[in-house]
Every structure is written in C-alpha cells, then in structure tokens.
Image (spheres, helix red, strand yellow):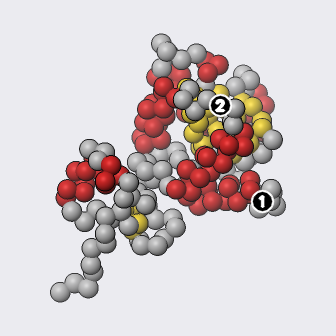
Amino acid sequence: MSSLTAQPLGVSLPPQDPNAISVSMPQWSHVVGYEEAQPEVINAMTCGYPRFFRHPVVVELQTFVKNQIFSEDDISIWELMIVPTSDVADRLRHFLLDSNSDSVKNENVSIHVVKNIVHVVRFPRCISHTAKQYWQHSGEIVTSRHAEKLLETLKNDDFTRLPVLGHTIKHLSFEEADSGAIFDLW
C-alpha cells in the first residue's frame, strides 16, 4: 500500500515549492478541463509546466516592468514579453515579424533593455498568440528563479549581484551594432 496521497487540483508539485514546475491534476477530467481551458480548472492552478503556464513570479516581473516602464501603454493595444537574453529577444522579435509580416510593421515590434539586465520585447497585443507560440515551442523562457533575481534587483536597485545571462562582450557589442530596434531604459 502506497503512502502517497493525491494532492488537490491546482496544488504545485512539489507542494509549497516556490519554483515548482508541475501541478496536481488528480482526475482525468482535470486534464481534459485544462486542455479545454475550463475556468474552474485554470483558476485552480497555482503553477504548471513553464512552457504552458507562466509562473506567478514571471507574471509579477512582467507587471512590475509594465507599470514602471510602459505605464502609458494602452493595454488593449500593446503587450510585452520578458526573455532571458538579448539574443532571445532578437529571435523573438524576428519570429513575430516573420510570422505576421502581412499585419505588423517592423517598428511595432521593439526590444527594450531595462537597467542592462531585463530584456523586453514589446509588440501589438493582436499578435500575442504568436509570442505565446514562441514561448511554448522555443523553450527560451525566463525561469522563476531568474525572474525572482531580476525583480529583487529592480525593486531594490541592487546591482551588486546582477544576473549575468547574456551580458558577454559579444552580446553587448551586438546590441550596440543593431539597427536601432533596441532601446535602453532607466
């Protein structure tokens, strides 16, 4: 007899782990409900697999950046996605433009670098489904631990322990040589 018991729907796995990457769906109907985006299943989830469920800390980081940097944006028109490096930001930007070349202008998809550590791609909300596809299929995402460090650094203005992803000489020289699609903020 097993000592394991099923966790209730939506509990992170492992339970109480702030960086959990799975979620309890103890019944087959929960799995079906997730796939069909049933609100009672989706709203019960505290976390999930990172490519399909944005971790709450990643959402908090995105909200913080939106409020601090893009507070003037009309949220019905603009969306943004935070990615781990400048190279990823460039790939996402190109993917969005290539996938939506008939409906989106080059200048409507831009890369912004906040405090030299946070890489943001800003794009029209109407193509957010394409950005989600990139997030899901490329795997080039901001992890919960990375988001925690970035958020802590931005909130505390503590640049003594910067996350260093994507900050090699090569990355920085690429940013300087780019066609002007990258904007330094703060």
Vertical placement of 142 versus 18: above or below? above
Q: Residue at x 27, y 80 (%)?
A: 4
In the picture, measured across the screen, residue 119 lies left or right of residue 40, that is right
Label for residue 176?
A: none
Quadrant where the N terminus is found in the figure:
bottom left
Going by the picture, which residue comes out furthest to the top? Answer: 102
Q: x%, y% of residue 163?
A: 70, 56
Circle 1 residues within 10 Å: few <14, some 14–19, many ≥20: few
Q: Is residue 73 above or below residue 146?
A: above
Visible in this render: residue 170?
no
Near-viewer residue (125 or 169)? 125
Q: Which residue is mark 2?
A: 73
Mark sitting on residue 156: 1
Q: Amino acid at mark 1?
A: Asn
Residue 16 visible in the picture: yes
Q: Residue at x 43, y 60 (%)?
A: 46
Residue at figure coordinates x 58%, y 15% from the top left: 105
- Whether residue 166 is situated above or below residue 108 in the rendered picture: below
